[in-house]
Amino acid sequence: MEILSAIIQLLGGLAMFLYGIELMGDGLKNSSGATLKRVLEKVTGNVVMGVVTGALVTAVIQSSTATIVLTVALIGAGVLNLKQAVSIVMGANIGTTITAWIIQLGSIEADGSWLLWLFDTDTLAPIALVIGIILLMFIKKQKLKPIGDIAIGFGVLFVGLSLMTDGVKPLIGTDAFITFLDLMNNPWFGILFGLVLTVIVQSSSATVGMLQTVAAIEGSGITFAMAYPIIMGINLGTCVTTAMVCSIGSSKDAKRTGVVHIVFNTIGTVLFMIVMSIMQKAAVFGVEFWIAGVDDTGIAVFQTVFNLVTAIVLVPFTNLLVKLSMIIVKDEKQKPARHPELLTLDEHLYISPAIAVAEATKAVAAMGALAKENFAKATQMLEKLDDAVVKQIDEDEDCLDQFSDSTDRFLIGLSKAVETEWDDRQVDMLLQTVPNFERIGDYATDIVELAQRMQTAGTGFSDVAKRELELVCTAVNEILDITVDAMGRDDNEAAKTIEPLEETIDDMIMILRDRHTKRLKAGACSVESGLVFMETLVHLERASDQCSSIAVMMLARNNEEILQNHYDYLREIHAGNDQEFNSARAKRREQYITPLKNIQ
């Protein structure tokens, strides 16, 4: 009964430990996501800087697997190339050792010192839990939530460690434990054990933590000769997860990144096993060193040395590792994507919601740029139809439709992963922006169809109608430029300039409809060209309206009044109660309405 109780306690402690690591890692990712993205984007071809970056990022998010998943996603997004990704992966192994040093805090003993007492985990863990609960349950500010998660994760991690320690103690000395120790005397069994356990637990940090927990118990019988093969096996175990991540629905370079990680860890393990076996047989450091018990500090030291030395030895061979990966994962001859910037969103990015939101924003801005270009080309077809350009517009419209469908799915999934209020509002804005840009693309193809209809009928616009259309198309193309630019730069000030131009375009459309109706009545143009003119005005006005909607949604992200009721905001500024809006509208009317009235 005592053994069963100990096992239950051990498993419960492990569950809390794993949850603590995950919660702390999530909090760190959410509090530093934007910084992580900037750091990763600045990785150059310098391999050493890539290794340092990989180590730092992994130290922050507390998971080498998470770093590799993120790296794979950023390859697909075009942020990183293969060589940059490989250097980051090399550094990830170093960064993951930080968890072992955090766990080592548990061995601190106060010995009467007030400062050491404060850093003793028996004191620090409860304090962290109290701070976390206060931030999450009482203060409840979204900006402080990641800090609360970090604090609670830290506290839960050490409570889990304590439960694991209490659960392991009754097992030490049992026949099963002694048999386990006998098996671990064989280094190959140690490697296999570390590998299998890491694959099961899905966290090298957690597996090392478990080893440290057992080793820290007095009389555990875990020697250094037993511990080092297990640590090497743990490193190999992370490769299995990497292989799974990098092989499912990923690009060729993503698969190559996984290959390099596996080869890198395998070579490092083989080389170290050879060296360590020779050193052990030669009794380097003395026989006692190898057979004496090892504690949690010793395990942390060896894991750090192992990963540092492996990186130092293999970094000079980075180019060879990259070439090897390209031999193993060969390129396939295929037609290059027409717009690769629209194929950058990968669900692996969910592992860091802040980075996923940033990449989604960039991709949606690229969609807007393509819709804008298509619209500008379409308006040119009204003057002179070009079949090659029409074909290009149709192909780009297909790209926009496919991107719209895939992005909707991506953003809906992302909305369940984000944890900050700003990211949540940004995802909502993107979800509403995508269909707006998609409709602008639709209007482009509608205008092309009108141009084709007019050509089939063998008719055209009058000179006056051409000059009128040219001016209003200039206005609409300008509002599209401003909208896409504001979206790409996340510029709310630029977004504010959209509504005055949109209302000016509405006034231009109204004037042109009135004028053209009079021309139709006077017989100054054909019925067919007249209908095409009027329908073109409809599409121009709707494209302008989509820009207005996007601008309002951008402004609503940090304005609660606009967020609650878009229509009240628009009604208020259109009523002339906003001096800034009135001034901007007057300038726009001078720019477009005055020249329009002068067209005769």
Image: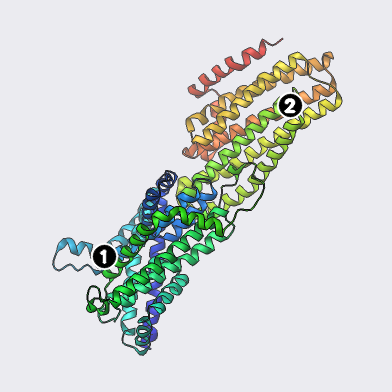
Residue 156, x across and y down, in percent: 35, 66
Is residue 364 visible in the rendered image? The answer is yes
| In front of the other: 47 or 35 | 47
Above or below, comparing residue 381 to residue 524 in the picture: below
Q: What secondary structure is marked by label 2?
A: helix
Residue drawn at (70%, 25%) of the image: 380
Q: Are marks 2 and 1 in contact (CB under 8 Å)?
A: no
Q: Residue 570: x and y, percent?
A: 56, 31
Q: CA distance from mark 2 to mark 1?
A: 71 Å
Q: Residue at x 71, y 35 (%)?
A: 392
Q: Is residue 21 left or right of residue 459?
A: left
| Residue 425 shows in the view | no
Q: Is residue 237 above or below residue 291?
A: above
Question: Dot 1, how many residues are within 10 Å of its Cα: few (below 14), some (14-19), or many (20+)?
Answer: some
Q: Quadrant of residue 567?
A: top right
Q: Nearer the viewer, residue 31 or 343?
A: 343
**Quadrant showing the N terminus:** bottom left
Q: Is residue 189 above or below residue 97?
A: below
Quadrant of image for the C terminus: top right
Q: Quadrant of residue 565?
A: top right
Q: Amino acid at mark 1?
A: Leu
Question: What percent of the width, then of the height, locates residue 86?
Answer: 46, 54
* Mark identifier at residue 161: none
Q: Amino acid at mark 2?
A: Met
Which mark, residue 381? 2
Residue shown at the point (41%, 48%) measured from the top left? 36
Q: Label 1 belongs to which residue?
A: 105
Q: Is residue 590 left or right of residue 180?
A: right
Q: In the image as oriented, which residue stretches furthest toward the right?
A: 457
